[in-house]
Image (tube, grey):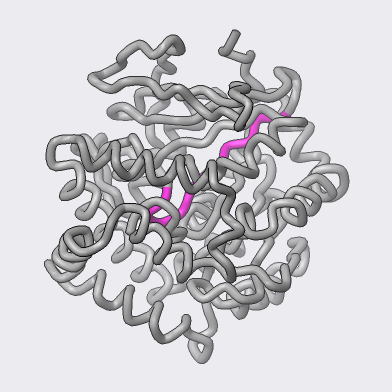
Amino acid sequence: MGGTGQADGTTGGADGATGGTVAADTGGRAWAGHQTSDGHQTSDGHQVSAGRWVDVDGPVYYEDFGGPADGPLIVCVHGLGASHTSWWTLAPLLARRARVLAPDLAGFGRTTAAGRRTDVGSNRRLLAGFLAAVAGDAPVILVGNSMGGMISVLQAAADPGSVAGLVLISPALPIPWLRQPDASILGMFIGMIVPRLGSAVLAHRRGIYTTEELLTQTLTRTTVDPSRVPPDAFAAMVALLKERSARPDGDAQADAALVTATRSVVGRLTWRRPLAAAVAAVAAPTLLIHGRQDRLVPIAAARHAARRRPDWRVEVLDDCGHLPQFEATGRTIALIDGWLDDAGAAGAEAARAAAIPAQRA
């Protein structure tokens, strides 16, 4: 879940993915057949991020939002159908005190599947390999939205030594049986998991609507007010979608990845015991932020997590849907900063060992 960028097993076998090699890009040089990004610029042209690549059983794109070299390392994990652009607004604010990286998971953004599976378990292993590549043996703070929150929880449970702290933003976590998602959202997910139907529907909709219209429809489903998404973030999402469409078979590959990931997310929320066990196993200090008007993951999921984990700090944002990082950026960064200074302080200190030197001039 996530839905800001697109209207179990893995190659390599081992559950703990091997670390890859970081590509020292910048300057727009090509790597593994891909072109590096110009990164994130403010309206006045100030560069605040750079696009890079790392090898984790194949190329993985990530956005480097910079930050102090001696700050903790924060890795932001996007949701279903989304990409690094999910963090376009929040990451520069996090980078005032931390090094911030935002990878594209397999099948999303600029990271093509390239022979890798795109279900939740496989992308959890890809995340493990990414962490090993950029942080070595040191722990990081994971910030995950929606499916990215689910994957972050699974990573913290599978390898506690790799995660010093968790910030979960409207995470896809177990929902009490009597509190299911909004009916229209539920219908959308049911359509996505029917064999061959999901890809057909996605392709049909692309023939009717423009990229901008499709993205606006997605944001209407996921936010209280889509106009709250900053124009530069909206433009970045549109540009990335068009870039993907321009690749040979780009839309078809992305559709297949999205359908596979959707089935995986729905499956883990339906057969909840392993995910509930992962929630129980998390040892890292955790902040959970949830929008009260979230239609994709009902607020009941956050309340359920709060009952199961009273040691977690759970904050509910009024007048906010599934994307607090866009809808309530100021309130979200204030909560994260306060948590990093309090319950998350020990985790932030531990994550300083993972901070990597700035790679940009």
Across and down, in percent, residue 235 comes to 46, 43
- Image quadrant containing the C terminus: top right
Q: In the rendered structure, which segment of residues is drawn in magenta?
A: 72-82
Give the left or right position of residue 169, taking residue 204 as reference: right
Q: Which of 316 and 279 is in front in this view?
A: 316
Q: Does the magenta stretch include residue 80?
A: yes
At a point 32% along the width and 41% down the height, the residue shown is: 106
Give the left or right position of residue 247, taking residue 53 as reference: left
Can residue 351 be seen from the camera position used here?
yes
* Number of disc labels: 0
Return the residue found at the far right.
342
- The image quarter in which residue 332 lies: bottom right
Across and down, in percent, residue 153 comes to 55, 54
Can residue 15 be seen from the camera position used here?
no
- The image quarter in which residue 250 lies: top left
Return the residue found at the far front.
44
At a point 31% along the width and 27% down the height, the residue shown is: 59
Q: In this view, does 88 lie above or below 69?
A: below
